[in-house]
Image (spheres, rainbow, N blue to C red):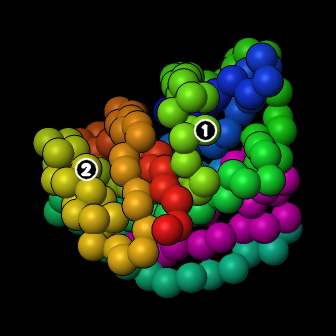
């Protein structure tokens, strides 16, 4: 499974984020200025960030096959005040993606920050995952965030699980 999330900026389709399943785990990466970086959640529970050629080990957590409901791969905030430099990779077609998700740019443009939240979710726990992130954002003081879009992608290797990408927008008061 490989999914690409796109939007339209100044009349041009742009790639924002990708998520991919491999035998070694689930990977989430970005385009534009952050295209050399990805986060990975490995089958044994090790979580890494890779920036360029450098691996930055983060922590070890639950192995994928032992996830009860859902676990976070990462949450990554993208400030939107300076424009959309984060999404500089033009989208022409995606020859290697099994899913392409389009996000209405008017939804994204309402906010000052785009948070990309990626999860591994046991099938049937999608509602719990969305409810959890909504409660988290409601608990933040001084910030107003809302869930803009939630996507869950069926995994082929890790059957019984989904890769979730939840986009949230917000602005500081």
**Residue at the far front in the pictured view:** 173
Between 132 and 64, the one lying in front of the other is 132
Residue 95 position (above or below residue 142): above
The reply to whether callout 2 and callout 1 are in contact (CB within 8 Å) is: no
Residue position marked by numbered label 2 in the rendering: 130
Confirm whether the magenta stretch covers residue 135.
no
Between 156 and 150, the one lying in front of the other is 150
Residue 22 in view in this figure: no
Q: Secondary structure at mark 1?
A: helix
- Which span of residues is magenta-colored? 30-52
Q: Residues within 10 Å of mark 2 (few under 14, many from 20)?
A: some
Residue 69 coordinates in the image, percent (x, y): 19, 58
Residue 166 coordinates in the image, percent (x, y): 41, 46
Residue position marked by numbered label 1 in the rendering: 109
Q: Residue at x 27, y 57 (%)?
A: 134
Residue 149 position (above or below residue 53): above
Residue 50 coordinates in the image, percent (x, y): 72, 67
Residue 14 position (above or below residue 125): above
Mark 2–mark 1 distance (CA, rounded to whole Å) = 22 Å
């Amino acid at each position: 499974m490989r999914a690409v999330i796109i939007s339209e900026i100044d009349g041009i389709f742009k790639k924002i984020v990708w998520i991919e399943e491999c035998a070694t785990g689930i990977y989430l990466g970005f385009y534009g200025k952050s295209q050399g970086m990805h986060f990975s959640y490995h089958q044994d529970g090790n979580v890494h960030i890779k920036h360029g050629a450098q691996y930055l080990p983060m922590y070890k957590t639950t192995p994928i096959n032992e996830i009860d409901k859902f676990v976070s791969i990462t949450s990554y905030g993208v400030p939107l005040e300076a424009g959309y430099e984060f999404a500089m990779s033009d989208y022409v077609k995606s020859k290697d993606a099994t899913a392409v998700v389009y996000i209405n740019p008017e939804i994204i443009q309402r906010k000052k920050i785009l948070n990309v939240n990626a999860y591994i979710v046991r099938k049937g726990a999608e509602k719990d995952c969305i409810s959890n992130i909504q409660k988290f954002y409601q608990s933040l003081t001084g910030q107003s965030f809302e869930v803009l879009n939630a996507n869950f992608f069926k995994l082929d290797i890790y059957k019984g699980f989904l890769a979730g990408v939840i986009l949230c927008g917000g602005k500081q008061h």
